[in-house]
Image (cartoon, helix red, strand yellow):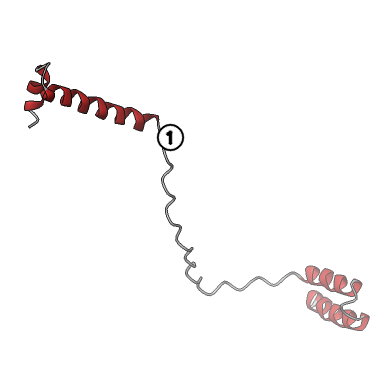
Amino acid sequence: VASSIPLAAQNEGGLAGLGAGLAAGVGFGNVMAGALMPQQAPAPAPVAAPVAAAPVAAAAPAEEPSIEARLEKLKGLLDKGFISAADYDTSKAELLKKLIG
């Protein structure tokens, strides 16, 4: 069939030539129309739910804050009214005893 199309197209007066020319024109028109149409963006891929990270092995024990840092924290708690002066004095004395030895 494909080899008969050029032969039919050479026959100027026949319907086969007209049909071949029409088919070629329609095909070319479809190609041009497709090229001029705005391209649609591809649909976004579905997003998978995030996978939870594997649990971390037992965390290393956090270093204990220095005595100076603990004293500053105690003073802040006293200033904000979260602890009483008696609690502050008692805790301060214990920390200073550890510091001095």
- Find disc 1 in the rendering and name its residue: 38
Residue at the location (83% across, 68% down)?
72
Residue 89 rendering spot, x and y as whole percentages: 90, 80
Given residues 40 and 32, the one toward you in this image is 32
What is the quadrant of residue 63 in the picture? bottom right
- Quadrant where the C terminus lies? bottom right
Residue at the location (50% across, 72% down)?
55
Q: Is residue 35 above or below residue 63?
A: above
Residue at the location (64% across, 71% down)?
62
Residue 70 is left or right of residue 20, and the answer is right
Residue 19 rendering spot, x and y as whole percentages: 16, 26
Q: In the structure shown, which secondary structural element does the residue marked by tag 1 occupy?
A: loop
Residue at the location (56% across, 72% down)?
59
Q: In this view, does 10 lie above or below 73?
A: above
Given residues 7 and 88, the one toward you in this image is 7
Residue 5 rendering spot, x and y as whole percentages: 10, 26
